[in-house]
Image (cartoon, rainbow, N blue to C red):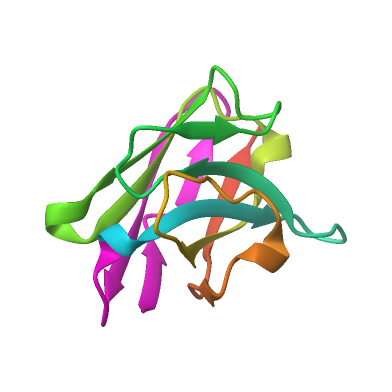
């Protein structure tokens, strides 16, 4: 599967953005999907994951209550709605896909086989 993340940009602190991850090449519903981010000078970290049906989600503590992961399998697209953004959310955001036959939600980077190219999110304070 090929992934393309988009929707990043420059936003003021307290604002919102919705990232999208468009999938092509294979049946999107055969993968659980995750979002990761990498801030300047830091390691890439987990943000959120969603199961293949969308019925299960998991969030990093930094994302809980502010971010919402979702997916539309009919459109082969995943989303990350980000609210109440602050400067610490500034990073390149990546979507990733993990092939699975269950409702498992992968959270570790090594579990994901396919990655999008990343989209930059910059939050100005």
Asked if residue 66 lies in the magenta stretch, the reply is no
Look at the picture and state if 111 lies above or below 113.
Answer: above
Q: How many marks?
A: 0
> Farthest residue toward the left?
74
Question: Which residue is painted at 26% across and 82% down in the image?
Answer: 25
* Quarter-of-image position of residue 17: top left
* Quarter-of-image position of residue 81: top left
Look at the picture and state if 87 lies above or below 61.
Answer: below
Q: Quadrant of the C terminus?
A: top right
> Farthest residue toward the top?
65
Q: Quadrant of the N terminus?
A: bottom left
Question: Which residue is painted at 32% across and 63% down in the image?
Answer: 30
Where is residue 99 drawn, in percent x and y?
45, 67
Question: Which residue is painted at 26% across and 57% down in the image?
Answer: 77
Q: Which residue is at the front of the view, 15 or 55?
A: 55
Q: Is residue 42 left or right of residue 99?
A: right
Q: Which residue is at the front of the view, 11 or 41?
A: 41
> Farthest residue toward the right?
41
Where is residue 28 drawn, in percent x and y?
28, 64
* Quarter-of-image position of residue 43: bottom right
Where is residue 89 drawn, in percent x and y?
66, 40
Question: Which residue is painted at 57% across and 29% down in the image?
Answer: 85
Q: Main secondary structure of the magenta part?
A: strand
Q: Which residue is at the front of the view, 99 or 88?
A: 99
Q: Is residue 9 left or right of residue 76?
A: right
Find the magenta span and give its range: 1-28
Look at the picture and state if 88 lies above or below 112.
Answer: above
Where is residue 39 drawn, in percent x and y?
75, 55
């Amino acid at each position: 599967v090929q992934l393309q993340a988009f929707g990043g940009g420059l936003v003021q602190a307290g604002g919102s953005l919705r990232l999208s991850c468009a999938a092509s090449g294979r049946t999107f519903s055969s993968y659980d999907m995750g979002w990761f981010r990498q801030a300047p000078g830091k390691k890439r970290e987990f943000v959120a994951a969603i199961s293949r049906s969308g019925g299960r989600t998991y969030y990093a503590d930094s994302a809980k209550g502010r971010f919402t992961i979702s997916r539309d399998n009919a459109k082969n697209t995943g989303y990350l709605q980000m609210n109440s953004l602050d400067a610490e959310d500034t990073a390149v955001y990546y979507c990733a896909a993990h092939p699975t036959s269950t409702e498992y939600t992968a959270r570790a980077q090594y579990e994901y086989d396919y990655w999008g190219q990343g989209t930059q999110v910059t939050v100005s304070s």
